[in-house]
Image: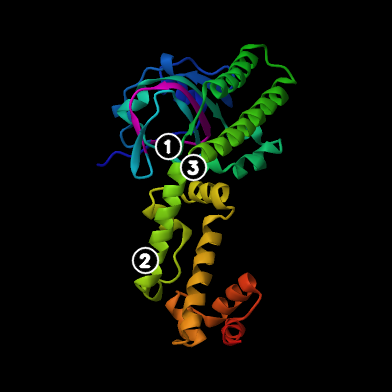
Amino acid sequence: MKKQPVIFNSLSQLHKAMGQPAPSHPLISILNYGEAHFDPKDFEQGIILNFYKISFKTSFSGRLKYGQGYYDFEEGGMSFIAPGQLLRMQEEEANYDGMTLHIHPDFLRAYPLNSIIKQYGFFSYSAAEALYLSEKEKATIFSVYRFIQDELGERIDKFSQDVIISQIELLLNYANRFYDRQFITRKAVNNDVLSKLEALLENYFNDDKSLMNGLPSVQSVAEQLHLTPRYLSDLLRNLIGLNTQQYIHEKVIHKAKEYLAKDELTVAEIAYHLGFEHPQSFNKLFKSKTALSPLDYKKSLLN
């Protein structure tokens, strides 16, 4: 029988599997990778954590895949896993130092963060889209981890949870800021992604794939670029101010204008060629983007 992923429902289960003592708090803990003892082969089918995992790797030996290329990240970084996601633990998973913060959803339940945390896009990123930190940023993140660790080491009182929640919020806000910096500093890599996306969509419409398969979806183009949909949208938003869906729509309108200028197809035929099931949907999108119906746009070209 094929092995199934190992599911961890509690922090105590995970601590035991990592050869560590039980956590001081049942719903939140920090594990030090250097002290963990486990064989990655025990988890070769992956693991599923039913709690949040925020990892801070201070050093890492090896290479990580990013898009279609490989990049060396010996200086470490951060990764974010939401509850219920499948996590593949490779051999190199045991070859780094750092800390990981585990937070059970029940720890957040009575706080606004329980809803807000779902809005942080990086919990949907893949491991190859991790956050890589400068020395100054690492020191900042380390100080937050150390504060939480020290707080958990103190006697738990009625203020402990409020204090720790505020530090988790601080950690997530720093991650947001540093990811924004990463999108900016990786502009060359991101422009390469944009060029590939542009070529991908151009070929899709020129080869009439839209006529056979319908409009390209965010999921399909992200998969072809070897990125997660959320990361691709965040990348594009930082680069050109549009998310992936908006960028696809811009390309659809550009192609529609080409067809309308040639005046060889009816509006309905153009709609079907672009992948719309109903011409009305095409008309609605075109007017929302140009303030003109397709017919009015065609007339404006004649004038």
For the record, the magenta segment spans 47-65
Residue at the extreme top of the image, as rendered? 154
Main SS type for the magenta part?
strand
**Residue 281 sits in quarter:** bottom right
- Label 2 sits on residue: 203
Looking at the image, tell me whether mark 2 or mark 1 is earlier in sequence order: 1
Q: Secondary structure at mark 1?
A: helix
Q: Amino acid at mark 2?
A: Asn
Q: Which of the pair 254/78 is nearer the observer?
A: 254
Neighbourhood count class around disc 1 (C-alpha, 10 Å): few under 14, some 14–19, many 20 upward: some
Q: Secondary structure at mark 3?
A: helix
**Residue 140 sits in quarter:** top right
Neighbourhood count class around disc 3 (C-alpha, 10 Å): few under 14, some 14–19, many 20 upward: some
Name above or below for residue 11 compared with residue 84: above
Residue 187 is labelled as 3
Q: Amino acid at mark 1?
A: Ala
Any part of residue 82 in sight? no
Q: Is residue 2 left or right of residue 141?
A: left
Could you say where residue 217 lies in the image, as x and y percent from the top left? 46, 62
Q: Quadrant of the C terminus?
A: bottom right
Q: Which of the pair 177/144 is nearer the observer?
A: 177
Looking at the image, tell me whether mark 2 or mark 3 is earlier in sequence order: 3
The nearer-to-camera label among 2 and 3 is 3
Q: Which of the pair 67/98 is nearer the observer?
A: 67
Could you say where residue 185 lies in the image, as x and y percent from the top left? 51, 36
Marks 1 and 3 sit apart, C-alpha to C-alpha, by 20 Å
Residue 127 is labelled as 1
Query: Residue 63 in magenta?
Result: yes
Any part of residue 290 in sight? yes
Marks 2 and 3 sit apart, C-alpha to C-alpha, by 24 Å
Q: Residue at x 74, y 21 (%)?
A: 159
